[in-house]
């Protein structure tokens, strides 16, 4: 998979990740990577290691993110798949929707907030803490 091997972390991620970790936030990876194309998991791990990113927990090859979110008591889920966002929001899990990668527009509500970058994510999390 050339696309996976050449991918980079999103702009702004490392700074926001480090800031939120320093503030005591936990990060849990819940991803389908490694299921259909095993190399995508390996490439993701390599990218994280190269950037000294160490999440608190990892769930690879996950088809049902709702079950893991419930079991982990996830406060906020960040995803770019509108179907996952809708399913989680319908089950009262707050979501941040990277909607610019999909053509589907979701109406924002108590459980869905559209974000465009890691600055938006940081501001949302800080506001939730107030």
Image (spheres, rainbow, N blue to C red):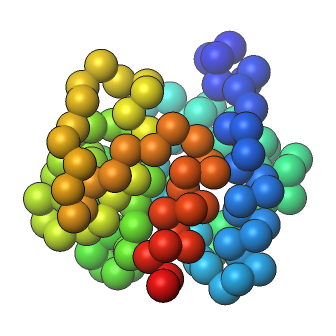
Residue at (24, 62) in percent of width and height: 111
Residue at (68, 38) in percent of width and height: 10
Residue 73, percent from left and from top: 35, 81
Residue 118, percent from left and from top: 62, 49
Q: Is residue 39 above or below residue 65?
A: above
Q: Which one is in front, 44 or 125?
A: 125
107 lies left or right of 34:
left
9 lies left or right of 50:
left
116 lies left or right of 74:
right
Q: Is residue 121 above or below residue 110?
A: above
Residue at (43, 27) in percent of width and height: 100
Q: How many circles with numbers are drawn on the protein?
A: 0
Residue 18 visible to an observer of this rendering: yes
Residue at (38, 75) in percent of width and height: 75
Q: Which one is in front, 93 or 50?
A: 93
Q: Which one is in front, 74 or 59?
A: 74
> In which quadrant of the rendered view does residue 121 lie?
bottom right
Residue 51, percent from left and from top: 86, 50
Q: Is residue 107 above or below residue 109?
A: above
Q: Quadrant of the N terminus?
A: top right
Residue 58, percent from left and from top: 55, 64
Residue 28 visible to an observer of this rendering: no
- Which residue reaches farthest left? 90
- Which residue reaches farthest top? 2
């Amino acid at each position: 998979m050339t696309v996976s091997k050449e991918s980079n972390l999103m702009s702004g991620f490392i700074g926001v990740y480090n800031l939120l970790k320093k503030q005591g936030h936990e990060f849990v990876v819940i991803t389908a990577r490694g299921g259909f194309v095993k190399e995508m998991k390996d490439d993701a791990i390599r990218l994280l290691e190269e950037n000294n990113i160490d999440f608190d927990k990892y769930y690879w090859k996950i088809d049902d993110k709702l079950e893991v979110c419930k079991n982990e008591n996830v406060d906020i889920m960040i995803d770019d798949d509108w179907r996952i966002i809708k399913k989680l929001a319908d089950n009262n899990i707050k979501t941040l929707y990277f909607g610019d990668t999909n053509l589907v527009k979701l109406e924002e509500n108590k459980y869905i907030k559209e974000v465009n970058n890691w600055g938006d994510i940081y501001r949302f999390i800080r506001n939730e803490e107030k």
